[in-house]
Structures are given as C-alpha cells and as structure tokens.
Amino acid sequence: MPSASLRLAVVGAGAAGLAAARELRREGHAPVVFERAAAVGGTWLYTPPATAADPLGAAATHSSLYASLRTNLPREVMGFLDFPFVASAATGSADPRRFPGHEEVLRYLEAFARRFDLLPLVRFETEVLRVRREPGVGWAVASRKLGEKGSGEEEVYDAVVVCNGHYTEPRVATIPGVHTWPGKQMHSHNYREPEPFLDQVVIIIGASASAVDISRDVASVAKEVHIADRSAPASTNQKQPGYDNLWLHSMIDRAQDDGSVVFRDGSLIKADVIMHCTGYLYDFPFLGDDSTINVDDNRVDPLYKHVFPPEVAPQLSFIGLPWKVIPFPLFELQSKWVAGVLSGRIELPSKEEMMEDVKAFYLNLEALGWPKRYTHNFSNYQFEYDDWLAEQCGYPPIEEWRKLMYAATTKNKAARPESYRDEWDDDHLAIEANEDFKKYLKSVS
Ligand SMILES: Cc1cc2nc3c(=O)[nH]c(=O)nc-3n(C[C@H](O)[C@H](O)[C@H](O)COP(=O)(O)OP(=O)(O)OC[C@H]3O[C@@H](n4cnc5c(N)ncnc54)[C@H](O)[C@@H]3O)c2cc1C
C-alpha cells in the first residue's frame, strides 16, 4: 500500500533537483529543495569572469560554464520528456538554434520551474552542511543561510534525495615536476573567456568536449595552444587541421623549473599556462559514514542502479550520477522511480538482492576491462537503463527518434568536430521530434 505523503529534503536545484521536486510532489510528497545559489539552474547558472582565488580548485566558482559554451546535444534530444526544449515563448526562448548558447538552457530550466510551480519549494542561498541518520526517526538535515555563521539549523526529514551535481570539484592531472614549474595552472572549472590568454603559450590537458571547445576558444587569441591527450599514442605531435597555432600531443611527461614542459612524444615547449580539462570528482561533503556510501576512484559505492544505497534505501537516493548520457530525461526517469519507491507504489528488491546486483555489475565492468573510475560512465547502455527505469514506473521507453538523433549527433561530432553544431544530416529526425512534441505543447504553454 502506498504510504502517506513524506517530508523530503532535496539537495540542489539544478536540472536534477528540479526534476526530482516535480516528480516527488506529483507523487503526493512534500519536498523541500535546498539550494546554496540564489537561483535555480545549477551548472547552467553562469558565473561571470573573476579572478578565482584558487584557479585549480572549486573555491567560490559556482558553475563550470565558459562564456562561449553552446550545448553539445541538439535541443530536441536534450529536453525533458514531456516538457520539450522547443524554441517557443513558453520556454523563454531567445536563441532558436538547435545547439543554443548556455543562456537558453537556463531560460528553459527557469520556464520548467515556473510551469510546474517549483520555485516556492526552493530555499535559496541555503547550504546543506550535514545529513545525519536518526534510526527510527528519519534523517536530520543541517542547513545554513548564506552569510550566517555557526553549525546551521537542523530539521528532520523522512528521506533525502541528493541532487548536488558532479561538475564542481575539479580533478587535476599528476605531472612530475609541476610543483616547481614557474607557470600558471588552472582547471577548466575556472575558465571563462580567451582574452586573458592573449599571446600566451597554453597547454590544455584532456580530450573531453570541454577540452575540445576550450582549446579552440583559446587558440583564437593565444600564441600557441598544445593539447595533451593521455589516450593519444606516445609519438603524437600533430598540427591540427585549419589552425596554425594548435597542436595535439601525447600526455605530458614532466614540467621543468625553466618553464618548459616535455611531452611523451619528446617535444619540449616553454609554456605560460597549463589548463587541466581533466574532469571532476564526485563529492558529498555533507554526508557522513551513516550514509553507507563511499567514493573511491570516482565510484560511488554501493548504489543499486546508481541511485539507492541498499543499506538505507529508499530513505537516501542520488539523482544524476551517470555521465556520458542525455542528462535531463535520465534525471526525470530516476526521479519518477525514486518518487514511486518512496510512496511504496514501486517495490525494491531486498537489501541482499540489491547488493548482489551491485556486485554483478562490478564484475561485468571488470570483465569488460573498464577502470573503476568509469563505474558511472553510461556510454554503452544509457538507453537500456532509461528504458528499465521507464518500465519500473509504467512509462513508455525513450522515443526511437531520440535514440537515433543521439547516435547521429555522436557520429556528426566525430566527423565535423568544428562545425557539428551548425551542420548536420538528421533534419528528418528533427521533423519527427517536433511532430511528436505537439502532444506536449499544451503543457509547455
Ligand atoms: C561544461 C559543461 C557543459 C555541459 N553541456 C551539456 C549539454 O550541452 N547538454 C546537457 O544536457 N548537459 C550538459 N552538461 C551536463 C550538465 O551538468 C547537466 O545538464 C545538468 O545541468 C546537471 O544537473 P544537476 O542538477 O545534476 O547538477 P548541477 O547543475 O551541478 O546542480 C547541482 C546544484 O546543487 C547545488 N548544491 C550543491 N551542493 C549543495 C549543498 N550542500 N547545499 C545546497 N545546494 C547545493 C548547487 O549549487 C547546484 O545548483 C554540461 C556540463 C558541463 C560542466
């Protein structure tokens, strides 16, 4: 039998926290959303340029967005399932491109929050400091308003849904000799605009979407840009087509006291800046041991289906951990599942069965030769996972056009890394998507 309405704490009002708040309330629960920023949007709330106190760390920089960022997914694919990311007044659109600038995504998330009346659920400028389990009672959540001092105010909730994002705590590459290297180091988390790199020699470590974008951005003003890609063969040293100041190398071998950096390909470059575009770490500073989870080499462990720690399920859950995914629809499906499980409408297996499932999943990763840090990398099975969640919740599987469009975009990005946001071959899928959206357009407006 479904239980009564639960009082729930949701940590974060980014896309995941908003999706969770909507689904939890839809299920009849009473969510309170804690957000340390002054507005919704999470990652999509751009932090203007400033001198970061700690250019390698998270410090006070809220978001990892850079000024020129455009989405790396087409808007049809990216949007929530029943609130399409169409370029209409109802979604606050001012940038109708298929791969719009970051401001458009924030406008869309704001429109989502308004449309489903989520803003009254959010306590802005309120940081969750600690989440503590009180056996038999619930979870004590200590939070503090911005500007206040002390250990915060504690309240008890029936369950906690963690939606704190995972693009804030920088991961930095290990480089022999870098501690006495005289140049400047920073993480892409703190990169905003190319202008400060005018006429400089910049080394960018990484091969992710951000590394690709930022290297092109910086090359527009820098003297030279050298990309260090650890997955490139050791002998790699190639000038990039279309540029006379951009090179691709294998990984850095060492940094030296005279300001030079030596790559594994043997080349030596005197550089001004090393920028780490090396990703982020999962971090839950507000959770203690009683959460029963542990983060090791970017594996959040143990989690049944990347959401519930078996020992304390369903009173603690995590929305949005998987990466290499289409995030918003996945957040939506995970949230529907959590909401249904919390109300008792959807059943979870026993603790033992959930642990067995986690172990089997790890064994499978090992058999595939995937490193631990790829535990939440969903590049091979995001749609299988989405469809499993949808089935649990009694929803239809992910639309065929969305799956095909995601595959077409991945292919197009590889073929046209410079221009995939403006040239594509999948107009037929965009037409199909927009036809499909018609059934939701009433809910958008
Ligand atoms: C550079 C970059 C480009 C991207 N491009 C795309 C793209 O093109 N398309 C796409 O779909 N996705 C993209 N993503 C992925 C993006 O992160 C997701 O789309 C999504 O925004 C993640 O939402 P989230 O709610 O999980 O996390 P976040 O957006 O990070 O939100 C987490 C929220 O939790 C709050 N919070 C954290 N800790 C606390 C606490 N203790 N107390 C209170 N509040 C707290 C934070 O302030 C934040 O608002 C990109 C990500 C990055 C970094």
Image: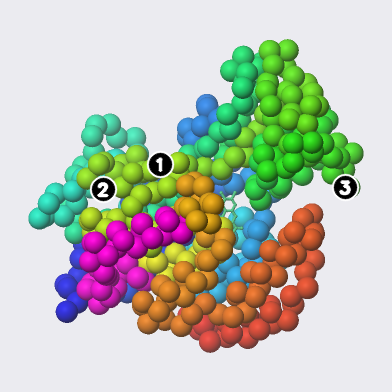
Q: Amino acid at mark 2?
A: Ser
155 falls in the magenta region:
no
Give the magenta range.
Answer: 336-365
Q: Earlier in the sequence, mark 3 or mark 2?
A: 3
Residue projecting furthest to the front = 367
Q: Residue at x 50, y 72 (%)?
A: 384
Q: Which residue is mark 1?
A: 296
Q: Amino acid at mark 3?
A: Pro
- Quadrant position of the N terminus in the picture: bottom left
Q: Amino acid at mark 1?
A: Asp
Please indicate, yes or no, whether residue 269 appears anywhere in the rendered image: no
Asked where in the image residue 321 lies, by quadrant, the reply is: bottom left
Label at residue 241 = 3
Q: Residue at x 50, y 75 (%)?
A: 81
Q: Image height check: is 157 above or below 385? A: above
Display coloring: rainbow
* Residue 181 at x, y percent in the picture: 65, 17
Q: Which residue is mark 2?
A: 291
Q: Residue at x 36, y 57 (%)?
A: 359
Q: What is the C-alpha distance between the residues marked 3 and 2? A: 50 Å
Q: Residue at x 61, y 22 (%)?
A: 176
Asked where in the image residue 416 lies, by quadrant, the reply is: bottom right
Closer-to-camera residue (150/326)? 326
Q: Secondary structure at mark 2?
A: helix
* Residue 439 at x, y percent in the picture: 53, 87
Q: Image height check: is 38 above or below 201? A: below
Q: Secondary structure at mark 1?
A: strand
Q: Secondary structure at mark 3?
A: loop
* Contact (Cβ within 8 Å) of mark 3 with mark 2: no
338 falls in the magenta region:
yes
